[in-house]
Image: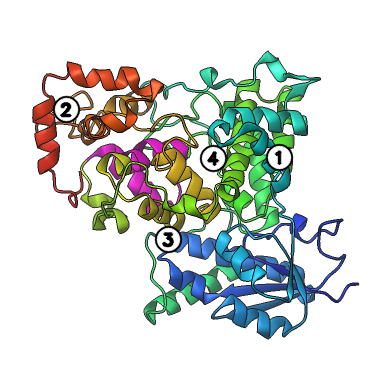
Amino acid sequence: MSDTPHWLFGDQLGPHFTRSGPHGPARDAPLVMIEARSVLRRRRFHRAKAHLVLSAMRHRAAELGDRVTYVRADTYREGLRTAVGDRPVTVCHPTSRAALGLVTSLDQVTVLPPRGFLVPLDAFRAWAEEKGDAALRQEDFYRWVRREHDLLMDADQPAGDHWNLDHDNREPPPSDAETLGLPAPYRPREDAIDEEVRRDLDRWERAGEVSFVGADGPRRFPATRREALAALRRFVRRRLADFGPQEDAMLADDPVMSHSLLSSSLNLGLLDPAECVARAEDAWRTGKAPLNSVEGYVRQVAGWREYVWQLYWHFGEDYRRRNALDHHDPLPDWFLELDADAVTARCLRTVLTQVRDTGWTHHIPRLMVLGSYALQRGWDPAAVTDWFHRCFVDGYDWVMLPNVVGMSQYADGGLMTTKPYTSGGSYVNRMSDLCGPCAYRPNERVGERACPFTAGYWAFLHRHRERLGDNWRMARTLGGLDRLRDLDALLDQERRRSPAAPP
């Protein structure tokens, strides 16, 4: 047994972070975990997120028993001194630049390669150098990963002779259906550790040490490897087959739809992406799930998740300050406080309620409701990134920085996506049941019933017409501005709208 301790961060909780290997910790090395209170003081996190992370860390420590030294400290530095003094330690490459900066500043720490991802950083770096930054598109990356890892491949061809089955996976929700009627996702049961975490959070909050947004409890997401595997099994066996067709749809009374709810488990390190995509592929090859659903899920895990992780490191720290559209407006209080009850627009009120009550929504409400509204209103992309990081149980710096700066807010000017992802109310109306009972009408731009998304969409296009004029994907859309007979009235209406008022 090696006497060199191995340090586990709170998002490195699965067995693949302690397993020995050529680039891993020594076999049976003693382990160190540090619960640093400063992390919770640094940002005003969602209460459910703080609960989940602490619960997962404490559950992992209980599983590891005498092998781990678990320290509760004010900072990581203080905790490490308490745990090991000046002794050398190893740690797997952390998932944030801040954490990497910390561990590399400590002479006693040896940083091992990352775990919990399919593609090594140096392999992506070589692929990116060959492509050039202007051509680092997700679709090309996804196909490369499929080939390299033999995912959904038949010899050298993609299964079903198509790389991309998005055309089968963009259906609106069934008409007149309040839910998809699928088996419920896995739900964990809280235990004594959860009770302890809740008491600690209550005590710290009463003492004024920390402050949270959102609701906490009951815990909805796995905090242990056993729970995460149970959630993965349930998704693959009972929900994966129906995942594809309506993965982009929204229903007010069915926030989960057919989604896996496994992102927080992956991002805590409780699941490894390799096992997730392997089980999904096996479901297709054994006839238990159709190819379009499996391909859609594999694309999310082996395509998008890996792509975002790699771009976080590849684009560097300056990427955080990108603001190609020159958006600087602050986030209003109602949004910061998750005050869904103040919002009239039903789509935004519904999604903000989901965030407030659970710390989660699926990718389309994030992109086409929350992110789209922020983009249209010109909110500062760094502040929007921080909000997503704090308010989602699966939100980490590496996750949210490319997703928000690049995908959602188009603040990188097109490095990550070929056009801004925003729309009028017609998209929300087509892909959801959210518009019917709303006080606003998705097809009205001006007047008391004007949809804030429809009016905001055209105002956004007008404001950035010159910036977006050379984008071939925007040419037809921008041309639509010239056909709006009420454009002047719309712009006057939007200028008079209070930036702090909820829609």
- Which kind of residue does numbered mark 3 sit on? His
Picture coordinates of residue 466 (x, y %)?
27, 30
Instruction: Sort mark 2 into few (<14), some (14-19) or many (20+) by Cα contacts within 10 Å.
Output: many
Label 1, label 3: how many angstroms apart (C-alpha)?
38 Å
* Mark seen at residue 126: 1
Mark 4 vs mark 3: give the one in front.
3
Helix, strand or loop at label 4? It is: loop
Badges 4 and 2: C-beta atoms under 8 Å apart? Answer: no
On the image, numbered disc 3 is attached to which residue? 46
Task: Say which element carries label 3.
Answer: loop
Spatial separation of the CA atoms under disc 4 and disc 2: 38 Å
Residue at screen point 57% across, 51% down: 264
Write down the quadrant of residue 465 in the picture: top left
| Labels 2 and 1: the sequence-earlier one | 1
Q: Is residue 170 left or right of residue 186?
A: left
Q: Amino acid at mark 2?
A: Arg
Residue annotated with mark 2:
445
CA separation in Å, label 4 and label 1: 42 Å
Q: Which residues are magenta?
A: 345-372
Which amino acid lies under the numbered mark 4 shown in the image of this protein?
Answer: Ala
Of residues 357 and 378, the one nearer the viewer is 378
